[in-house]
Image: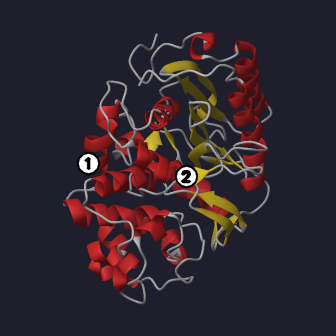
Amino acid sequence: MHKSFPHDPVVAPASAGMDPARLERALGLFRAQQARGAFPGGQLVVRRAGHCVANLAVGLARGFRQEVAEAVVTPETRFNVFSASKPLVALAIARLEEAGQVELSAPVARYFPEFAAHGKDAITLLDVLTHRGGVLLPDFIQSWEKWGDWDAVVDALVRAVPRYRRGTLAYHPNEFGWILAEVVRRVTGQPLPALCERELLAPAGVVGMRFQGRAEEASQVARSYWVGSRAVRVHEVDVSAQLETVYNAPQVLTAFVPGASLWTDAAHLAALYELLVSGGVARGGQRLLAESTVRAYTARAVFGLDRSNRLPFSAGRGFLVGTPWPSFYGAWATSSCFGHAGAFCTLGFGDHATGLAVGIITNGNAGPGDFLNRFRPLVSALRRACVHPVKSTG
């Protein structure tokens, strides 16, 4: 039996103010999705009021296409959760902001002077956090063999010419993490992972999240699969054509791609959101972020048509947030929800209204429509299972 946080024992849903039958229906939806082939394997972890009420693992982590030996998903199986990493990058910036080391209204070039080249001098940290910087690198993103060379990443950022006018809403798939990680490095003199571990992950007890790992570990990470039948493009990149080849390659899994790669399991992902729904206070009582900071980063800052995905987009500072209208968090009234998708297979989220903290990780991708159809009913069912208000134990 798992006893140490975040793999602590699962408690009765009623002890966390949740309806057991409703929660079981939500878990049944997840099992049914896997059974019908929506994804080879996955994990779902639900936390509320400081307790774990569900820790489900189903299906295959590897061997779905018989490309390697079959391996089943366990609660400890690590997945690459893609852009579900972006909130952790944003929280590193939040820590620096609270310490007075950065100002969000300041140009990126104040901290990373070379970035100003080619008309990028006015782009601010807030622009990048809210995907309004206009800097996209489709050619470099397709040159994935270069991602492990940080000097090449920085050079690409310096040479970049904005694709859109500053202020235009255009999702930054990889650029978000690359830009902000270099700011962290310039400001603190240390790489982003070191700051995250010292300031956030270790104090919160979620050290099982890593932006990269050693080559010998890559074969143990769950493989990512494209199970859709249609091509899907993000900006100018056909992600459906390259996902399996690129994101299962050891040189990519071990590269530092902070805005689009993170090794973790659903228990750790849910635990990170527990910290946030607790207002920035870790389980041991240590305050890691001011509650006002958590609220500022998880509140809606932008809403509109995203030029990269050609879809409606609602975001805070590094988080995808709910709306009064239909979203992947539910049909209506999801403004209290915040989190981030990972490719078209994963969602980590918290809900200020219900106190839910959830990690849903799978390894099957089929595009934005499938993502919406899978996650909207699942998140709605989880929220409906919260029948009694409770206070977090912090």
Q: Amino acid at mark 1?
A: Ala
Left or right: 360 as drawn, with respect to 211: right
Left or right: 219 as drawn, with respect to 110: right
Residue at 61% over, 30% down: 354
Residue at 76% over, 33% down: 33
Q: Earlier in the sequence, mark 1 or mark 2?
A: 1
Q: Amino acid at mark 2?
A: Ala
* Numbered disc 1: secondary structure: helix
Q: Is residue 342 above or below residue 137?
A: above
**Where is residue 196 shown, x and y percent of the image?**
31, 46
Residue 5 image-quadrant placement: top left
- Residue at the far left in the pictured view: 189
Residue labelled with disc 2: 299
* Numbered disc 2: secondary structure: loop
Residue at 52% over, 49% down: 298
Q: Is residue 189 above or below residue 63?
A: below
**Where is residue 120 shown, x and y percent of the image?**
42, 83
Image colouring: secondary structure
- Residue at the far bottom in the pictured view: 118
Quarter of the picture containing the C terminus is top left
**Where is residue 293 shown, x and y percent of the image?**
41, 49
Left or right: 327 as drawn, with respect to 92: right
- The one of 311 and 226 positioned closer to us in this rendering: 311
Residue labelled with disc 1: 194
**Which label is found at residue 251?**
none
- Give how far apart the Cα atoms at labels 1 and 2 are: 27 Å
Q: Nearer the viewer, mark 1 or mark 2?
A: 2
Q: Is residue 169 visible?
A: yes
Q: Is residue 121 above or below residue 373?
A: below
**Where is residue 261 shown, x and y percent of the image?**
47, 52
